[in-house]
Amino acid sequence: MDDQNRNLILATVLSFVVILGWMVLFPPEDQAPTGPAAEQAEQEEALRSAEIASGTDEGPGPAASPADAPRVQIDTPALSGAILLEGGRIDELALKRYHTEVDPSSPIVNLLNPVGSDTPYYALFGWAPGGSLDYADVPGSDTPWEVIEGDTLTVETPVTLGWQNERGLSFRRTISVDEDYMFTIDQTVENTGEEAARLAPYGTVARQGELDLAGFFILHEGVVRMSDGELQEIDYNDIPELDDIQREGGPADVVDVAQDGWVGFTDKYWMTTLIPDPDGAFTSVAKYVPSADIYQTEARLPTVEVAPGETESTSMRLFAGAKEWETILAYQEQGIEGFVDSIDWGWFFFLTKPIFVLLHWLNALIGNMGWSIIFLTLLIKAALLPLAYKSYVSMAKMKELQPEMEKLKETAGDDRQKLQQGMMELYKSNKVNPASGCLPILLQIPIFFSLYKVIFVTIELRHAPWFGWIRDLSAPDPSSILNLFGLLPWGVPEPTSLLAIVSLGILPILLGISMWLQQKLNPAPTDPTQAMIFAWMPWVFMFMLGRFASGLVLYWIANNTITFTQQYAIMRSQGYRPDVLGNILRSFRRKQDAK
């Protein structure tokens, strides 16, 4: 086996093995927790705010949410939903810009749901009691708020709620929302009583029931938070395993944040996040309430003391919506530290981020994500062209050296050391690097992984069409060879069916053909084992990548096509004329002879 074929075999097999094992090699990064539980006396009273929200301890539990419960409607260009006045919680929220299926007549995506539904998911704000105050003296999960101002929450019209206890404390809560997904909750408490009151504001996002998740372990779904500029991620299945902090009543992770922090839940495309004042301190909590099967994140602000005749105010924001890159970036530029990192960029963030930004820019310019992927491939190949040129020139020179290498083999006979020394001298005298053919292929591996991550996690690729039958580049090619691509009157197997493995679409078949043609630039290896590996490789890749996102398969086809063109042109420029048709015919004849 000569060195050229050995290197080609090595590069191809290595690519195959790495792509086959990408799920093992490419998990999301889980950073260690940033610190132990908070022990500050100022916040001790607020540490039981979770029980107020979940009703798992001494505090009152969440009220049921019947259809006739009083509500304030939410209606913006991006959102529709309602605020439940009992508790003042935001517990109904749907995303107008997104549908559950590609079909625009399908239902819009539902994000938040009330208690009593199959999947309760809501945001609750309130005050935790301190000093002589009790839970009945502060607004919590079942407080009967009254509407003071505003009938419907819109971008132009905030809503103000009010409630007063029997000890002279008057509470006001003003909720406003922008044209995208950011709510602002301003809370005030006025003390008209005769004694000072100690209490601590908090915000909680809670969800329970069966979680609607992608469930793919290269994707982080669960708690995402920023604490003093440090990102932390905790998967949903890891939350019940957190260190048990007894005062929390269950598994919890508590972090004191000095500034620049936020905390919430992230799914594949959606997120619900509490965002206190970036310049203010708070306690960030991720916890699980086992008695009620509730996952919670909390932002607990420092305890305040309100003297008689005084008023204290606090503000917190709530992001509840789609993880659109432009939208989240705009919020980051407004002062939310590291908010773009709520998108799961993965280990290769130094590649995934610039690849996505370039793809996003191309899509804005072209207006079609499929063509943008093709142009992105062109730009990547152009950037790698100097390296590819050296590689293909070296490969062309290796072809020219074939006669001399055959002579060396005849001269050396069974003396492998003499053969290796002779080949090294031959390479050196002709300035040929036998390993250069591997490098362009190896460089494609992290690019392939990064582009896969971009296509898989970014909402901009969700339901993005190319043309014709490709209506969702984030999903596999929906066509199938089993019904002759729609010509026969029956459907295709479900993605979970074993038949889906052989239910190849048009794009995977084109992928196999493009790899096969690329191989035919060079004659098949004379060694039978090498020839067999090369013969099977395109079709193995075709089946292996057949159920990948069609956007990724499109990238691979474009990459193969451009590589074929580059290699053919460069080899011709070096005086070597690839005989593609002749190589195909010779390969066919060998198969016929073998029969």
Image: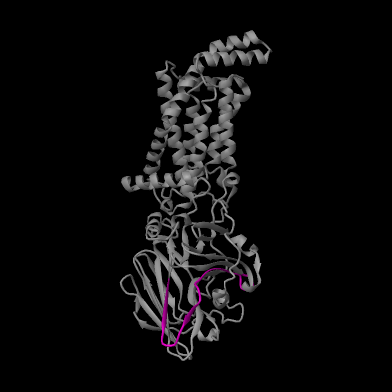
Up the image or down, 185 lies above or below 373; here it is below
Is residue 454 left or right of 543 when viewed as pictured? left
User: 207 or 101: which is nearer to us?
Assistant: 207
Q: Quadrant of the C terminus?
A: top right
Residue furthest to the right? 414
**Is residue 50 in view from this perspective?**
no
**Is residue 102 in view from this perspective?**
yes
Up the image or down, 40 lies above or below 590; here it is below
Question: In the image, what residue occupies the spot 37% across and 42% down?
Answer: 371
Q: Position of residue 174 (x, y in %)?
A: 38, 77
Q: Position of residue 167 (x, y in %)?
A: 48, 90
Up the image or down, 14 lies above or below 204; here it is above
Range of magenta residues: 289-315
Q: Quadrant of the N terminus?
A: top right
Question: In the image, what residue occupies the spot 58% across and 78% down?
Answer: 55
Question: In the image, what residue occupies the spot 65% across and 12% down?
Answer: 418
Is residue 248 left or right of 550 when viewed as pictured? right
Q: Position of residue 319 (x, y in %)?
A: 43, 65
Q: How is the image coloured?
A: one colour
> Does the segment drawn in magenta span residue 73?
no
Q: How many marks?
A: 0
Please identify the quarter of the rendering in which residue 239 is found: bottom right
Q: Position of residue 555 (x, y in %)?
A: 44, 40
User: 356 or 580: which is nearer to us?
Assistant: 356
Up the image or down, 149 lies above or below 584; here it is below
Please identify the quarter of the rendering in which residue 186 is found: bottom left
